[in-house]
Amino acid sequence: MRATMTAPAPASYHPLSVVSHWLVAVLALVCMLSILLATQVGRLSSWHATLMNVHLISGQLLFLVNLLRLLVFSAFGTPEPEGCDGQQVLVARVLHALLYGLVGFLACTGTLLMAAHAAGYQVLGWTVPLLMTGGAMQLTSQVHVMAGMALVFVSLAHILLALAMQLLGGKPVMQKMAVEGKLADYVSAPVESDGYARLDLADTGSLGNTR
């Protein structure tokens, strides 16, 4: 019976994971700013509907990009924490779990609210049914807002922890989130090497091989 070989952890995050990380940051910022501006201008403003659409689209894209990150993590792994004790690793994992969970919850409740507001409208010849009553919509909206506020606080905690580990603890946190080589090469035609996709190097064979 052959022993199962465990591939070594990569030295840094997969380039797609790095790109999606910064894309998530941009989408989260757009999503939060659009809903804040929509609240400020009010429903009577001509900008309100546009800002709400931006909030909806950026929120759904945020959810999809986070799913992509999880798939990349599953396929290519993540680097081992360097110089971090067990408590620091635990805090980081809890923050990441909260981030992914809150984004998924916000995407689900946001979709429900969108469908509820669209009840009675014709979409491709299909009438959107009434999914929630007024009371249920109000409750869902309140929970959605509270989850959004929680996401803001968790995101700030995530940023502060990363900065503290980088600047005060001397941990190479930001270096692991930098893309090596040309970004277009990774996206267009990746080659597997050193535990993650590379194109600027010759193909060395299967995933996990080293130079």
Image (tube, rainbow, N blue to C red):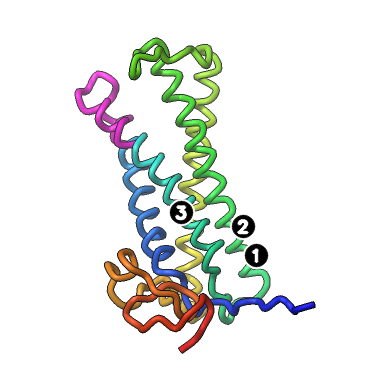
Mark 2 sits on what residue?
94
Q: Position of residue 28 (x, y in %)?
A: 38, 48
Mark 3 sits on what residue?
68
State which quarter of the image contains the N terminus.
bottom right
Q: Which residues are magenta?
A: 36-55
Mark 3, mark 2: which one is toward the viewer? Answer: 3
State which quarter of the image contains the C terminus.
bottom left
- Callout 2 amino acid: Val
Mark 3, mark 1: which one is toward the viewer? Answer: 3
In reply to whether residue 206 is colored magenta, the answer given is: no
Instruction: State which tag comes first along the sequence, 3 or 2.
Output: 3
Task: Determine whether the residue tagged by mark 1 lies in a helix, strand or loop.
Answer: helix
- Callout 3 amino acid: Leu
Query: What mark, if any, has residue 171 been given in the picture?
Result: none
The one of 11 and 185 positioned closer to us in this rendering: 185
Residue 79 visible here: yes
Mark 1 sits on what residue?
90
